[in-house]
């Protein structure tokens, strides 16, 4: 699987949550008006983009539309992709120019910090660099043990002391070992105890003094690991850490398991922090360097991957296949073909109010089944038909999108 495919697959839940909803909303409009911008901003906020960043993106879209004279709502998705890619631009590379270079990794328990360090070590080793790890998160014995497991998986050496040891002493010994072994990169795991910010600040200040004395002029990164599933809470967490340490970049983990990957945008827009790596899976090579263009393309590209040559060969449909309704797409947000509505040839035209009432009865029935954890499979074809009905009023279309999002969450 290629780099873009990994990112695209890892962003599936976020893409369905943000782009899927936006695409449905945009397709329900025949013209670009103020109501469209308001709904777009609302969907961005719901997608964990945050109010400030949602207003910025909407404002940029207004400017693009005015400057380019765009009148077709169908062009909005491409414009949004360009805006997001531009917003995320910056220095996203990991700097390891000196020998040795040093990377301090900070983060609270449970965000995937140790795993990210192990994967980062494996990636750097695959690039031909010699790496050594320092287990300076001595607050928990489990942290040392977990890092040791990852050092073995990545096949890189590790320096450790016992639980409760001075983290700065671990960093000192790791630097000494790196010098003796002529290592290219030192990666040190450090604690992130936000419940006592003063202790954290004191600990990091002491580590910084050791680094400054033992490795003057070395290239240094202070990376903060955040769990993408925390959404806007991750942004608040980053603000607190920025007060305690000079953070140079973000490692955003567990993107593949959450629809809240939109948090990448406020991290860059509101905090000015570049995202250096994203975690898009559980394999050792699933920590990927962050590429703004690839991220934006994977976020807004709702189409399935192009078929292979063998798949493109035409074939004759059997009578049985023609009689079976097409299955819903892997994501209900994707533009799957709408299922035909079976109507009597001479049936009277349904009024707008009658259609509204019929849809509301369907929605209430679906929500009741969802509340009872009942089987909803037989209702999905009708939900897809409502998804593609352009005659529903705006409130009903919004309800359709919310139902789609609920069903997708249940599927996942």
Image (cartoon, grey):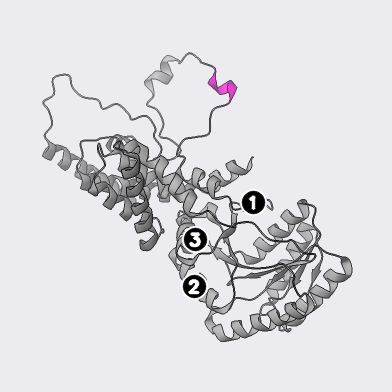
206 up-or-down from 68: above or below: below
Magenta segment, prevailing SS (helix, strand or loop):
helix
Residue marked by disc 1: 286
| Residue 222 falls in image quadrant | bottom right
Q: Based on the picture, tell me whether residue 370 belongs to the magenta stretch.
A: no
Which of pointers 3 and 2 indicates the residue nearer the eye? Answer: 3
Say the numbered circle drawn on residue 239: 2
Magenta stretch in the rendered image? 308-313
Q: Residues within 10 Å of mark 3 (few under 14, many from 20)?
A: many
Q: Based on the picture, tell me whether residue 310 belongs to the magenta stretch.
A: yes
215, 349: nearer the viewer: 215
Q: Residues within 10 Å of mark 1 (few under 14, many from 20)?
A: many
Residue at 56% in and 79% down: 244
Residue 375 in view in this figure = no
Give the alpha-carbon distance from disc 2 to disc 1, as whole Å: 27 Å
Q: Earlier in the sequence, mark 3 or mark 2?
A: 2
Compared across the picture, whether 299 is left or right of 125 comes to left
299, 222: nearer the viewer: 222
383 up-or-down from 364: above or below: above
Where in the figure is residue 99, as x and y percent of width and height? Answer: 80, 64
Q: Are marks 2 and 1 in contact (CB under 8 Å)?
A: no
| Residue 114 falls in image quadrant | bottom right
Q: Residues within 10 Å of mark 2 (few under 14, many from 20)?
A: some
Where in the figure is residue 108, as x and y percent of width and height? Answer: 57, 72
Residue at 34% in and 52% down: 58
Compared across the picture, whether 289 is left or right of 402 comes to right
Residue at 77% in and 55% down: 125
340 up-or-down from 110: above or below: above
């Amino acid at each position: 699987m290629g780099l873009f495919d990994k990112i695209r697959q890892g962003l599936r839940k976020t893409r369905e949550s943000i782009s899927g909803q936006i695409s449905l909303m945009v397709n329900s409009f025949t013209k670009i008006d103020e109501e469209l911008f308001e709904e777009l901003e609302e969907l961005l906020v719901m997608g964990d983009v945050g109010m400030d960043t949602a207003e910025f993106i909407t404002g940029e879209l207004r400017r693009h539309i005015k400057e380019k004279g765009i009148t077709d709502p169908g062009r909005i998705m491409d414009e949004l992709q360009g805006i997001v890619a531009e917003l995320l631009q910056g220095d996203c590379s990991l700097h390891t120019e000196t020998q040795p270079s040093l990377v301090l990794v900070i983060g609270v328990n449970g965000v995937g910090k140790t795993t990210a360090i192990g994967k980062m070590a494996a990636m750097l080793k695959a690039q031909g660099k010699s790496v050594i790890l320092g287990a300076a998160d001595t607050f928990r014995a489990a942290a040392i043990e977990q890092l040791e497991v990852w050092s073995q998986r990545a096949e890189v050496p590790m320096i450790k002391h016992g639980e409760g040891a001075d983290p700065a002493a671990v960093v000192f010994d790791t630097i000494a070992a790196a010098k003796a072994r002529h290592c290219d990169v030192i990666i040190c795991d450090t604690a992130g105890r936000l419940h006592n910010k003063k202790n954290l600040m004191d600990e990091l200040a002491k580590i910084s003094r050791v680094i400054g004395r033992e490795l003057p002029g070395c290239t240094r990164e202070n990376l903060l690991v955040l769990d993408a599933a925390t959404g806007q809470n991750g942004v608040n967490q980053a603000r607190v850490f920025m007060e305690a340490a000079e953070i140079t970049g973000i490692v955003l983990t567990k993107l593949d398991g959450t629809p809240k990957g939109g948090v990448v945008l406020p991290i860059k827009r509101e905090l000015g922090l570049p995202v250096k790596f994203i975690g898009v899976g559980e394999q050792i090579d699933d920590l990927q360097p962050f590429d703004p263009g690839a991220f934006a393309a994977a976020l807004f590209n709702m189409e399935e991957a192009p078929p292979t040559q063998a798949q493109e060969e035409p074939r004759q449909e059997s009578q049985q296949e023609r009689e079976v309704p097409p299955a819903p797409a892997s994501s209900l947000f994707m533009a799957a073909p709408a299922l035909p509505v079976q109507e009597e040839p001479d049936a009277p035209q349904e009024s707008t109010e009658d259609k509204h009432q019929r849809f509301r009865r369907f929605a209430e029935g679906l929500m009741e089944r969802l509340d009872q954890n009942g089987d909803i499979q037989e209702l999905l074809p009708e939900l897809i038909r409502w998804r593609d009905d352009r005659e529903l009023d705006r409130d009903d279309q919004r309800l359709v999108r919310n139902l789609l999002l609920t069903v997708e969450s249940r599927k996942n």
